[in-house]
Image (tube, rainbow, N blue to C red):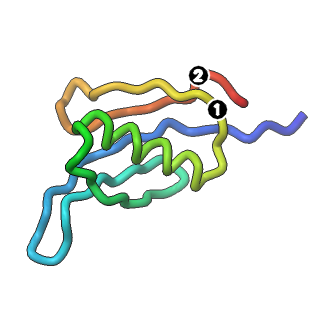
Amino acid sequence: MTMTMTQAITTKYLGATNHRGARIVARSQAGRKTYSYDSGMSAAENHADAATRYAADMEWHGSWAGGALPTGDGYAFVMTSRD
């Protein structure tokens, strides 16, 4: 049986610069992608949205759970069940 392993996703806030708006970077062992920060959502919602979008981009389908890292430096998300 061949099984594709899903990886944990971590997210981190990147503040605005002179050239770019605020954004969230989502990463796993498979790579990283950056998503725009939506000021209409809370910080936690922005991190969850970035992780959800990253999982969709990676074609990882399932239910996810996550929370803030104890270091205060972002969030981590793991798949709890596959679709």
**Which residue is located at x 28 percent, y 33 percent?**
44
Q: Residues within 10 Å of mark 2 (few under 14, many from 20)?
A: few
The answer to whether 36 is drawn above or below residue 74 in the figure is: below
Which residue bears the numbered disc 1? 62
| Labelled pair 2, 1 in contact (Cβ < 8 Å) | yes
x, y percent for residue 13: 23, 49
**Which residue is located at x 23 percent, y 38 percent?**
43
| Residue type, numbered disc 1 | Gly
x, y percent for residue 18: 9, 75
Q: Residue furthest left?
A: 18
Q: Residue furthest right?
A: 1
Q: Residue furthest bottom?
A: 19
The quarter of the image holding the N terminus is top right
Q: CA distance from mark 2 to mark 1?
A: 7 Å
Which residue bears the numbered disc 2? 80
SS assignment at label 2: strand
x, y percent for residue 50: 40, 47
**Which residue is located at x 32 percent, y 36 percent?**
45
Q: Residues within 10 Å of mark 1 (few under 14, many from 20)?
A: some
SS assignment at label 1: strand
| Residue type, numbered disc 2 | Thr
- Considering only order in the chain, which callout, 1 or 2, is on the residue closer to the N terminus? 1
**Which residue is located at x 72 percent, y 30 percent?**
83
